[in-house]
Amino acid sequence: MNLDREERPKYLKDCLGMDHLKKDLRAFIKTGNPPNILFVGPPGLGKNTFAYAFSTEYLGREITLDTEDGDHDYMEINCSLLTGVDTVRELISDFLKTKGQTIRDGVRLKKILFLNEFEKMSDVAKAGLKVEIEQRANNVVVFFATNYESAIKELALGSRLATYRFKKPKDSELKKWFIEKANKHGVQFKSEDIVDDIVKKYKGDMRAMLIDCLEALRGYDNKIIDKDDLVKVYEDDTRNYAVQVFNSDNPKQKWISLWKEEFFDNKRFLEDYMELVGGKYSRVFAKIDSRLRRGCSDLIQMGALFDIIGETK
């Protein structure tokens, strides 16, 4: 399992920073009637993490993502891949048309829908989504996560959302957090200056610090990490792998050889690779992304992707 799944906090108390948000989310859980919520801020600051931790506490159990069908009461949608109206019709509508299965104190709880990178969803899809949300208001709590608040204003939902703006934690907090995660996975550094460099490089993107950096560093067999090691890690990010696969005469085999050697995060690879391939196969990419997020086999799902799109570039 990749570090983004291993280290994702299950509870609000384990999330870094945003104490005012934790307080409000706990209050929403206590009332039993949470509003739709907007998270605004750069990638990697914990928007998905907070929604997941809230859902765990609200539903009173761990979210089930490691099955083909996913969780009956919780769904994550990556809007950078699922941009069109078919997303609303085929995935979101089907998810919302059934009642939640979780009952607490005799009350049936709402389902939770997390829409990541919402600004990338098409205007037609946003319009269809607005209708779905209004019709299913008693059945769902929607988390909108976006880099730009204007994406919600276009949907005319801004006044009906509880809005929270995410900011980068202090460098000292990020440094302490990263060292703790690194030590947990057997990674140590020759000097703390190396960690300072990592914090500066990733500009508060905690997800990238885990997936792009620590994921690679923990493959060094407990070696004391020096600056030369760090330079190599910076060079070997998923964008670099995507370019190598795209330029290969046999993309599927090139991906297999790279992934078995480096074991990078394929959800991030998909986003990079789709930009190179173009929008023609966006629905295929979206389905593969959804299956990976549910814990399906990387090898099987990515193999299927390359089989479907063939050698087309």
Image (tube, rainbow, N blue to C red):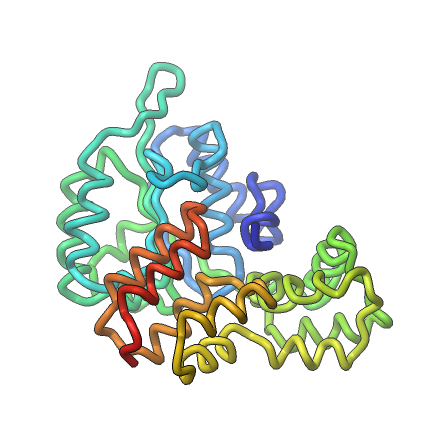
Residue 33 position within the rendered picture, expressed as x and y whole percent measured from the top left: 34, 32
Question: Toward the viewer: 215 or 136?
Answer: 215
Q: Residue furthest bottom?
A: 247
Q: Residue at 72% across / 76% down in the picture?
A: 230
The correct choice, above or below, for 41 with respect to 299 in the image is below
Q: Is residue 275 left or right of residue 202?
A: left
Between residue 178 and residue 244, name the one nearer to us. Answer: 244
Instruction: Name the residue at 19% across, 41% down.
Output: 94
247 up-or-down from 305: above or below? below
Tell me where residue 14 appears, x and y as whole percent: 62, 44
Q: Quadrant of the C terminus?
A: bottom left
Residue 79 percent location from the top left of the image: 31, 61
- Residue 144 appears in the picture as rendered: no
Rendered image quadrant of residue 110: top left
Asked if 9 appears above or below 209 in the picture, the reply is: above
Extreme residue in the top direction:
106
**Quadrant of the rendered structure where residue 284 is?**
bottom left
The residue lying at 68 percent from left, 63 percent from top is 174
Taking the spot 49% from the left edge, 48% from the top edge, the residue there is 50
Q: Is residue 47 at least partly visible in the picture? A: yes
Against 294, residue 186 (above or below) is: below
x, y percent for residue 214: 67, 63
Residue 213 horizontal side relative to residue 22, left or right: right
Depth order, front residue of 2/44: 2
